[in-house]
Amino acid sequence: MRLLIAYLSIAFIFILLIVRLFVVCVIDSDFLVKKGNEQWYRDLPLKANRGVITDRNGNVIVGNQSVYTVYLRPRSVSNPQKVASSLSKLLELDENKLLDKITSASVGEITVKKNVSEDIGKQIQALKLDGVYLTSDSKRDYPYSDFLAQVVGYTNIDNEGQNGLEGYYDKMIRGVDGKLLITSDNRGSEISPTYSYLPSIDGATLTTTIDINIQAFCENAIKIAHEQWNCKRASMIVMNVNDGGIVAMCSTPTYDLNNLPRHDINMLNAYSKNSMIVDVYEPGSTFKIFTTALALEYGCVSENRSFFCPGYRIVDGQRIKCWRSRGHASQNLAEGVMNSCNCVFMDLALSMGVEKFYQGLRNFGFGKKTGVDFFGESSGLLMRESSVKTVDLARIGFGQAVAVTPVQLLSGVCSVVNGGHSVTPHFATEIRDTYGNFLYKYENSSHRILSENTSKKMCELLENVVSKGSGKKASVQGYRIGGKTGTAQKYENGHIAQGKYVSSFVGFAPVENPKYAILMIVDEPSSYAYYGSIVAAPAVSDVFSRIFAYEKTAPTVNESIEYVTMPSVEGMSYNEAIKALKELSLNFEVEGEGDVIISALPLAGEQIIKGDVVLLRT
């Protein structure tokens, strides 16, 4: 019996050993091999460079700067105090915290600091500290600092694209990391040459539609406007009218892409938000462009039709005012567009009816995303067709009861003036890998929205606005420019926000063969001179004049600038002041509904261009 028990015990032990051997050799083999490799082999990451981003002329607008990442293997450190002291001084770290990490670490490797400059990295290498090693890395470099801040976006600490073009095209421009596998002793020190090598693959190059020189013109213009009008935000977009390529886009306030406010996530999100694609606004009179174009296209209006404006229209029992409360009296279509008369555009919208008008607006892309290559695009707000009442239709006709994104409105304007075909706003022209192979190439596709005749007629009407009407401040001597002013009240919590306006001007040039369209928006100008004709149009003139010089565009109009002296109209009655201005061929905007002129800009005695816009306060 005892012998049997002994045999059974020995057999049981052998069974346990066999089971354990099976577990070690079969079940846990992968785990144990991995643990062994971790002791004998060390992976050194080989970081790929992100692809550069260039403008349309090959100028680098986002590049890379060589840096180091500092690692530490605690088991390999023979003198923790020396290592902690040396690294903390060079890397500006807390010495005691670093020492604690070294002496109490339970992991095999610690990342001490990323994005260490080349100079500091070389100083660390020269110290030859046990257990400390560096790998080459790169971080994003933005040579133009705060230019294109809301467009290109930024990367996180791991060099991954977070938003803007950096985020949208991250998968193609991030690259593929490699690694270096070396053998090491039980303290982590290298004991043999490289065991294996997997090279990194740098990211692809993204070529954009941006022109950095035109971008600079715009950045300068919005900064001047922001300071001059003390506004909440000034924004500008320049677009190629023929294919929707975004040549420039900027907004204030901005920030330095090389010095991100990462400590304040709310500030970072606010500064980096691209309001020209993400936010919507009520366009006001700039929307009248589409009402006019569609009415002409559908044959709902002739050029010689007469409109009468008493200063208001009664629609569905509601009194809707024209911006000039005293009215524009009798006028034809061209005069109505020049005067930006609300009554004219109410009549045009009502003559088309909801079905036709909405069909045309949808063809222009309103109420849906444009498809721009950027995250977070808004669709705009277009009232559901079945819910549109007659009074709503009238208001939409002159740019109320509808909301658009700036990029949506500008792409629509491009379609109006380019011969009548649609465009898709976009940033990317092409993306090529490190071998020059195409990963992406933009292909223009479009559909017809307007006839060429309608487009040509619209160019003529909009040229009159600049040459003879309220858009005079957008003119450039020697060149034909078309455009439209816009001034819209803002709403807060469903109610009009008193004293808060969005002032804008949209222009295109040259009229005879349009190439560029520009939208300038001044959000909440802190001045009673809040009209788009005064606060936004001059910036468009400035940018166009610089573009003409930059591209060596020859003047096409032989004209001399006529100056007149601003008359003294303060204290005059409204009618007397208007008569005095008209005698000098001056245009005007009126603030208030009084009968006596309180003040006027420009000031009396100033030399101003004939046809310029005067602001009257009553």
Image (tube, rainbow, N blue to C red):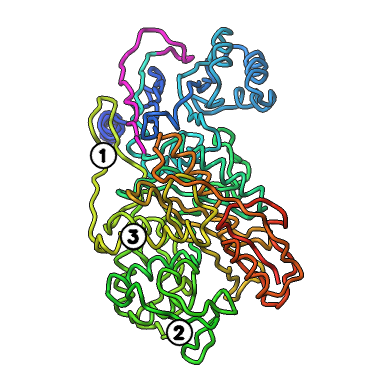
195 vs 113, nearest the viewer: 113
Dot 1: element? strand
Q: Is residue 20 visible?
A: no
Q: At label 1, which amino acid type do we have? A: Tyr
Q: CA distance from mark 2 to mark 1?
A: 47 Å
Quarter of the picture holding the N terminus: top left
Which x, y percent locates residue 514?
35, 49
Number of residues whose C-alpha sits closer than 10 Å to that of mark 3, classed few (under 14), some (14–19) or many (20 or more): many
Is 300 colored magenta in this rendering? Answer: no
Mark nearer the viewer, 3 or 1: 3
182 vs 314, nearest the viewer: 314
Dot 2: element? helix
Which x, y percent locates residue 471?
51, 58
Q: At label 2, which amino acid type do we have? A: Val
Q: Is residue 378 above or below residue 298?
A: above
Upstream in sequence: badge 3 or badge 1: 3
Q: Is residue 142 visible?
A: yes
Check disc 3 and report the residue beneath it: 416
Q: Quadrant of residue 130?
A: top right
Q: Residue at x 38, y 13 (%)?
A: 183
Q: Is residue 95 above or below residue 284?
A: above
Check disc 2 and report the residue beneath it: 391
Q: Which mark is residue 440?
A: 1
